[in-house]
Amino acid sequence: MKNCAIILAGGRGSRMKRSKNKTLETLCGKPIVCHIVDVLQKQNLKIFVVVSPNSEIIKKLPNCEFVVQNEPLGTGDALRCACAKIGDNFENILVVNGDGPVFDENLLIKMLDMNNCAVNLLIKNITEQNTFGKIERDKKGNICNIIETKDCTLEQLTITEINMGIYCFNSKFLMHNISKLSKNNAQNEYYATDLINLIYKDGGKIQGVDADNFEIFSGVNTLDELVVAENKMQKSIIQKLQNNGVRIIGQSYFEFGCVIAKDTTIFPFCYIDKNSYIGENTKIGVNNLIFNSNIGDNAILGANCHLSNCKIGVNCKFGSNITLENCVIGDNVTILSNSQLINAEILANHTVANGVCFQNIKNK
């Protein structure tokens, strides 16, 4: 492999005030770090994940290699731990934070296009007050430094060009400068951002990649920021569904990865999880909850239907207030209202009466 990626996931995330690692907080049904890994794997990158000792992240990412950061001494120290394991086996090294930002495949392709640069750096212009590191340029307009907010002067705080926290380093420049990092800063930590100035002084060219040209969901450090990222990703999911011919009436929630075919209508207050498929020309009524289920074409589900681990055939019609768990329903089946079926199989062309409760049954 020519390139590899390092995910920095060893931080404590104290601002979240939650017991679990913030990279495992879900974003539209999937842990944040898993969104990032999925995109990286599409580019056939070898992935190294920096974690704290006994991290629960290891259980979530079976196809990655792990590097333990024994003490939380900053992003620069985390990167140094990873570099010690990676050595000189790769030409370019992509570095991302485990808590985001979550990005699309187009951005990844651009970041890996080094164009003879020592570093590609994701940047953005933000006029509102923020806590991102500020991009400093020399008199010729070249990027020469990143200054963390806590270390900024009042003048530097007015800089609107900020660091988005995704880098791609030429391996030789990174390995040559990683040992030069120091803790001479306000937080007494090793900053990965200090590498930009070190590489600049080492003669390396630093290229800024404009984040505005790509779909990006911002990094998460607080629960408020998690809500913002969640809303933005949810809006993107809904837009893609609508672009594919799905009509969405009112508010519903769609996990990342759910598949809904064209000409289907989703009525308000539904929840559809990432492992579910809904076929063409289907109507999903108000307040439906659908988990790990496959619904065939031309189905009609009334209000308050709850499906879990089910396979529903084509041309099925369900009334209201129906619960199905671990069921297989054949084609052209009608289930009237107020029914509950658990571990049931209903063969094609049958009708289930109103108000029944079936468990562990197969009709003939």
Image (cartoon, rainbow, N blue to C red):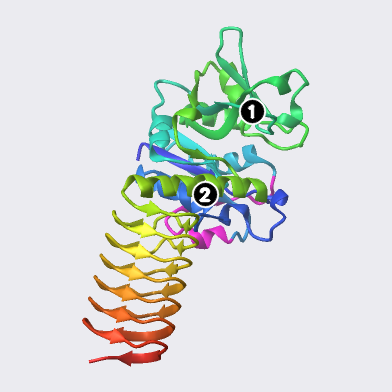
Q: Is residue 65 left or right of residue 202?
A: left
Q: Is residue 17 above or below residue 132?
A: below
Earlier along the polypeptide chain: callout 1 or callout 2?
A: 2
- Across the whole image, how many numbered discs are drawn on residues? 2
Q: Is residue 283 magenta?
A: no
Mark 2 falls on what kind of element?
strand
Q: Residue furthest top?
A: 139
Is 59 within the magenta? yes
Which quadrant of the structure image shows residue 299?
Answer: bottom left
Q: Secondary structure at mark 1?
A: helix
Q: Counting other residues with Cα less than 10 Å from the Cα at mark 2, is it few (<14), some (14-19), or many (20 or more)?
A: many
Question: Type of residue at label 2?
Answer: Val
The front one of 237 and 26 is 237
Residue 152, how many percent across, how many down? 74, 25
Q: Position of residue 213 (x, y in %)?
A: 44, 28
In this image, 349 relative to 356: left or right? Answer: left
Three-letter code for the amino acid on which mark 1 is drawn: Asp
Q: Which residue is mark 2?
A: 49
| Pointer 1 with pointer 2, Cβ within 8 A | no
Count residues near mark 1 (Cα–Cα under 10 Å), then give few for <14, some for 14-19, many for 20+: many
Left or right, 349 with respect to 20, comes to left
Residue 76 to residue 241: above or below: above
Residue 265, given in percent of the width and then of the height, sits at 36, 58
Per the rendered image, the range of residues in magenta is 56-72
Closest to the observer: 129 or 299? 299
Q: Residue at x 51, y 19 (%)?
A: 204
